[in-house]
Image (spheres, rainbow, N blue to C red):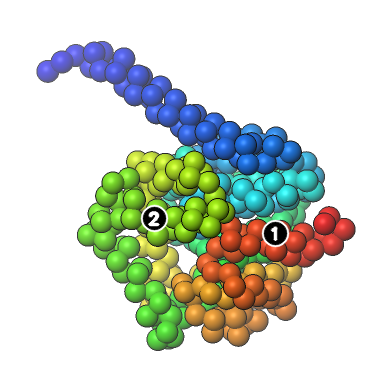
Amino acid sequence: MRPLKNFIPCFLMLIALTSSLEARAASKAITEFSLSFPAAQPLTENYINIGDVKYHYVTAGQGPLLILYHGFPSFWYTWKYQIAQLARHYRVVAVDGLGSNLSDKPEAIERYHITRLVDDLNKLAYQLGGDSPFYLVGHDWGGALAWTFAQTHPQRLKKLVVLNAPPHNLLIELLKNNEEQQKASTYMDFLMHPVGEAILSFNDAYLIWNMGYQKHIDHHRISPAEGALFRQALAQPRALHSAINWYRANTNSPDSATSRWPVAAQKTSAESLLIWGQQDKAFVPEFLRQLSEYADNPEIHIIADAGHSPHLSHPQKVNRVILNFFSPAAE
């Protein structure tokens, strides 16, 4: 057996190489952002320790704290249009969600349960902004998380905006009782199956990247170089597996009481806005009619010709709606 001391230099070299690759990935994304928005507020990146995990985030601008939380299968760069405009009025923080891009990717599935993620988000906001209420914007899984945060910590929020996502407890209700949502969500079973994950992980996650981002390149919403950033984020070791763990932790047992967090009929008193791309195929529009059972007087803004990612397909409309909701004078 080789002495342990012979492995120490190799181990240290591996750590250095990993750190170098992470720094290169972060700097490349920041460079692309600067090229796309040369007049935007300077963008910086950092890491923050939240208990047993480390989150990566980027930030720009000054003023009240505004946190952007992306969905599946993405990373902070999906908010490029929003960062560029919102950072004129707010201190914008766009986080890499747990398991994505340069944030930590814990092995335990339960670490991705929405209760843990809500706790992480609360601690992150305290570290970045103290006990002052903040603005929160979420999309897809980041939106479901944002709704749950608002249901459990409404006093921590100034206002909430969610794009194309129902509250998590409403999603569980739909998965249990709505046949159309069950049909629309059959892809979840494929995602969570080992064979499905293996297929989607092949060739640096090309298939799921192609389904998610090629159309945005074709429509010139992101450049080919920016498209490569999303591919690179998906190809990070364990990134796709960790992203799918959000599904395993939060949708795998819709009959389980632990899935129905915080409780089946929990509402939020936080002032909230849902931006809904009407062509979305992931969620049935039935949830719009039920939303008032889960949030007090939510505003709903429908973009008729948008799909699941209106922040990329219709950024100016989305930005205008967000700014007008947060502060009409900020436009």
In the image, residue 307 lies at what x, y percent? 54, 69
Q: Which mark is residue 210?
A: 2
> Foreground: 257 or 320?
320
Q: Is residue 111 visible?
A: yes
In the image, residue 41 lies at what x, y percent? 73, 38
With 331 as the anchor, is 150 left or right in this view?
A: left
Question: Tag 1, which secondary structure?
Answer: helix
> Foreground: 75 or 260?
75
Q: Say which quadrant the C terminus sits in.
A: bottom right
Residue at 59 percent across and 73 percent down: it is: 305
> Foreground: 250 or 277?
277
- Give the CA separation, mark 1 to mark 2: 24 Å
Residue at 46 percent across and 55 percent down: it is: 213
The disc labelled 1 sits on which kind of residue? Gln
Question: What crowding class fits label 2: few (fewer than 14 Cα within 10 Å), some (14-19), or many (20 or more)?
Answer: some
The disc labelled 2 sits on which kind of residue? Asn
Q: Quadrant of residue 14?
A: top left
In the image, residue 198 lies at what x, y percent? 25, 54
Pick whichever of labels 1 and 2 is earlier in the sequence.
2
Question: What crowding class fits label 1: few (fewer than 14 Cα within 10 Å), some (14-19), or many (20 or more)?
Answer: some
Q: Can residue 72 be seen in this view?
A: no
Residue at 54 percent across and 84 percent down: it is: 286
Q: In which quarter of the image is residue 250?
A: bottom left
Residue at 61 percent across and 59 percent down: it is: 311
Q: Which residue position is annotated with label 1?
A: 316
> Foreground: 147 or 320?
320
In the image, residue 147 lies at what x, y percent? 60, 66
